[in-house]
Amino acid sequence: MTATVLRSGALRAAAPSPWRWLWLALAAAVLLYLPILLTERQIFGFRLSNMMLLNIGLSQVNLMLITMLGALSLNYLTGSAGLISIGHAAFYAVGAMTAAITGSQWGWPFPLVLIAAGLGGALAGLLAGLPSLRVRGLYFVLSTFAVHYLVVFAFMEYQFKFFDVVGVPYKNATLGSWTLSTPMRWYFFLLPLVIFIYWLLRNSLRTREGRAMQAMRDHELAATANGIDVRFLRLKAFAFSSAIAAMGGALYAYYLSNVTSEFFGIQFAIQFIAMIIIGGMGSLPGAVVGAAVWLLLPSIITGLTAQAGDTTGLLRSVLVDHKPQLVQAIFGMLVIVLLIFAPWGIAGMATRLKARLTAWWSRS
Amino acid sequence: MSHALELRDLSVRYARKGFALDGVNLTIPKGGVVALLGANGAGKTTMIRAISGLLPLHNGQITGGSIAMDGQSILGLPSHKLVRMGMGQVPEGRLVFKQLTVEENLRVGAAVLPKSTEKERMDAVYELFPRLQERRSQAAGWLSGGEQQMLALGRALVTRPRLLLVDELSLGLAPLIVRAIYKQLKLVGETLGASILVVEQNARLALDFATTAYVLERGRITLSGSAQDVANSDLVRESYLGVAKEGGAA
């Protein structure tokens, strides 16, 4: 008897409600209209001021999409497999370097370059993951820290050997005869790619390996007592995560068309950790939200301070003259406040809010 | 005929801590139910770790002797391989995966099986512990201690092991629940013909359950025999069952 009741419950969860389709259609419409809105800067003939669009342009949105790949892959590694890495900027650099060798030097077509970057990232991730077989926790984090400096050093050597101080140049990205020459074209290339990676990661958590990874995160001992080869799985997770990050790095390089080793500083690595803390550790939507906040908030703050341009005195000095510091301070505060009051991040807050609203709804 | 498990002169030492097991002999016949008794620190958990390949995780090392499962040496094999060879492990402290649902926990256990048998084996576990079925879509962290222990046991049983190692099943659980779980465990042993080794602090319970018992003291086996003989021995009556010596001070 109970079995049938349970089964119907499971079915109900699986069948999407009409509301869900409506939401999906709405989201698709917004995502498709967004680049047009951000380029033409008007909606249904009504001209929007810069501030109405929060001082955001399509280029920032594209950079955000590229950064999302890093946040998603780190979230997969940290939130689902329980491994922390400060090395994700390094995998971006590996991707950028692989793209420079195969694309700029050997002249491979862009799609092949992307695949090569992914493979290069997987290989680098495999090597970087090797210490995880011996050391745990903080010691492993430090080993990824070392990987970061090694890779950045290698990138610098490479840059100065084959190019110069100006940086490593990249060709235009082309898919067949279609050149990604405008932000609009980039947007429509990046958006499906990010959605695909998101879908891939989400589904992979529901496979045997995905469950095994979560088991390993919760209790390593119990996982191995259930026949899971923890060491192998850890390497695999690391390689997979790095491959995605490296693809992000190749896209990043192609998008900026010129990259130097200074781009991949330690701050670049830590920003990914900040993103998944802001968004919510272990939550894929959280990684998306975290990357969005991290990439878009600076423009919003910059836009706001431009509004305050005619104020004087101390306020002006803070808002206008020390804009970069202000942005940094706000991010620092955001991370601290979230860690203290909402360690589950923005995604966790949303779930809690939803649960509370549902409870309130059913009561009244 | 080979035994389900045979330890010969097994010695184990931990880095910096010295010997934990010192020449231990233990035999589990096919289909047998063996209890291992002993006080805290006697080496019970060390023995389980040595058998299940978990010693390296605790900086321990086998320094001598042999371990054979079904007549085949398993010395030095990692835990996850042993599971695939038919050794079910229920580690101490339950260790369910709290953020996964009950069903997902069982699926983790079933991941070593071919996909076609997964569902049938999981249904068999649900049949054994109907409570798990009622709660199959709940996160394991929300289960009571007894239910978590059922889940930990079910997770090991889903592979239908030929040899089952159970470490401190009664830890932190109400006696009634422990008895109920042991009853189901006995049923499993009888229906599947699995050999079982239980490590248990609660000597009375373990002696009721098992057919053979070993007493471990400071890394050595000091007594072994049929559960009944062991239960009636002076050593166990005094030290483990709390029965005062006859004629002793009241």
Image (cartoon, coloured by chain):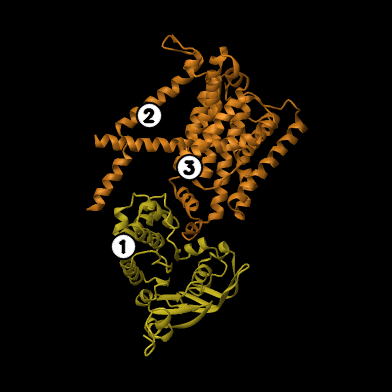
- Residue B18 in the image: above or below residue B137: below
- Residue beneath label 1, please? B128
Q: Position of residue B213 (x, y in %)?
A: 42, 79
Q: In this view, does B199 lie above or below A9?
A: below
- In three-dimensional space, the C-alpha distance between marks 1 and 3, rounded to whole angstroms, equals 34 Å
Q: Which of B91 and B66 is in front in this view?
A: B91
Q: Distance between the residues labelled 2 and 3?
A: 23 Å
Q: Mark 1 falls within which chain?
A: B
Mark 1 and mark 3 on one chain: no
Per the model, the C-alpha gap separating discs 1 and 2 is: 42 Å
Horizontal and vertical percent for residue A210?
Answer: 47, 47
Which chain did the image draw in yellow? B
Q: Left or right of A266: which side holds B158?
A: left
The three-letter amino acid code for the residue at tag 1 is Leu
**Parent chain of label 2:** A
The orange one among the chains is A
Which residue position holds label 3?
A: A282
